[in-house]
Structure formats: structure tokens, C-alpha cells
Image: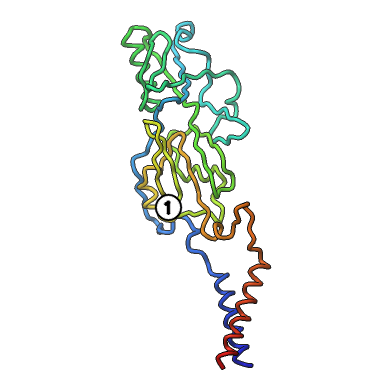
Amino acid sequence: MRIKFIASAVMAATLLLGSCSTPKNITYFQDMTQGEIVNPLTPLEVRVKPEDKLSIMVNTPDPALSSLFNLIQVQNRLGSTTSNTKSMGSNANSNSGQVSFYTVNPEGDINFPVLGKLHIAGMTRFEVGTYIEEELVNRNLVKDPIVTVEFGNTGITVLGEVNSPGRLEFNKDHLLITDAIAMAGDLKVNGRREDILVLRQESDGSQRAYRVNLLDMDALAASPVYYLQQNDVIYVEPNNKVKRSTTPTGESPYTPAFWMSIASFGITIGTLIISLTK
């Protein structure tokens, strides 16, 4: 009888300790030490792609002259969003006034007033501004122009095991993947931090898949998707525990009562085996 009791106690303790063990894949950046310096890749700036929307404003000393090159008066730093879109860094007053966009065609061109067709694909917004300024000066149209360029659709999509999935708009020239995760409300406890999928649209319209590990800061900083681009898609998979415990309808049958029943059944089987082998 004493042996049965000891065996049952040992099995119960084993089950309890197993359920209380500390997961090792929850904490971010586990390889980081005090004072360590991380050297990421060269910052990847957002560059113009086909179907992008841009606001381009030309300023000159003569307002009448400026109006020849502007579709409509626009405000600095676009931040308009839809009701289902969250934004980062938008101006609180950005929804005042009207905004008109240039849409980049599939060949990477825009039709700019007076200058005509301009090929801007692959440029940063600063490079686009410099290019237009030089064209205006070289064609003797404006002496000292100031051109301001803003992206109107620098959005990404975050899906899966995050607290606030959805489309996220940003107006930063350098957006880190950690920024995007923070905008999505951080990962849920059951999200796989060590194997996050990032899909990036290529110039030919295809998508390239990348995998990143939030537990390893050095590997993350060396990844091509450490800096995000417009239209990137981030997908956080659920861990194996969630996959095993979820039915096709999305419900979990594995309630606390279920696990208590399993534990009780295991103890009973263990006691039976000991009794039969005495």
C-alpha cells in the first residue's frame, strides 16, 4: 500500500512540475548581453514601387509659379487612414485640407505637370525630390525650387498570433520589424517568436518569403527584413501547443477539467501497473 502511495505521489509531482516548467522561447533577444552593440545591415529606406501613391509639392518664391507644378495644395506628412487601419507617426492635423496623389504606373513612371513623364521607380522620396528640383532648374523653369515628397501608402499587414492584427500605415523612412510588432500590440504568448514569416513583394509582382527569429538579435539585425518595406506581410504562427489543442472549428477541447482527468487517469494506470507487478 505504501508503494502505491509513493508511486502515485511521484507521478502527480511529475505532472505538476511538467505543467509549471518555464518556457524558453518567450523572451525576446535572448542572446543580448549588457553593453553589447548590435550592428544591423545598412538601413533599408522605403523606395518607390509601381502602384505607389506620392504627394509631391513644389515651392517657389512665386506662388503663381508654384501652382503650375502642384496638382493641389497638400500638407506635410500624410497620415490619412481608414477606420480599420492603425498608423504610426501621423500628424494629428493631417486630415485637414485636401490631398492629391501621383500614382506610379506599372513601368515606374509618373506624369508630372510641365515636366511630363518621369521615371522614379527605385528612388527614395528624397531622391525623387532632388530629381524633380534638378529637372526644373535644368529646363530653366524655376530658379530655386524646393520639392517635398511624401509617400501616401506605406502600409504593411500583420497577421496571426498578435493582439491587434490588421493593416498598419506608417510614415517613417526606416521602419523596423519590431516597430511593426509593437504597432500590432505585441505577440500573444502562444505566438512562435523563433520562426516569424515575412513576405516581401518583388519588382515583378511575386513575393519572397523570409524567416526571422526574435529570440536571436544578431540574426534578426542581419536579416533583409529587419527594415520593412511598403506592403510587407508579417505572419506569426501559433505554437505547437495551440495547434494540437485547436479543433477544426477553432475551439479548444482541452480545458483544465480535461487535463485533471488525464492526470487522474495516469495515476490510476500507474497504480494498477504497480499492483499487477507486485
Up/down of 172 relative to 224, above or below: above
In this orientation, which residue lies closer to the viewer: 126 or 120? 120
Residue 227: quadrant of the picture: top left
165 left or right of 210 in image:
right
Quarter where residue 228 is shown: top left
| Residue beneath the point at 46% across and 22% down | 54
- Please provide percent x and percent y for residue 140: 33, 7
Q: Quadrant of the N terminus?
A: bottom right
Is 95 positioned to the left or the right of 109 in the image? right
Can you name the residue that lies furthest to the right here?
257
Across and down, in percent, residue 64 comes to 48, 6
- At which x and y percent is residue 191? 52, 53
Question: In the rendered image of this protein, does residue 206 appear above or below residue 178?
Answer: above
**Quarter placement of the C terminus:** bottom right
Amino acid type for the residue under numbered disc 1: Asn
Return the residue at label 1. Answer: 213
Residue name at image x 62 percent, y 52 percent: 250
Q: Nearer the viewer, residue 275 or 159?
A: 275
User: Compared with residue 13, is residue 256 higher up or lower down, i.e. above or below?
Assistant: above
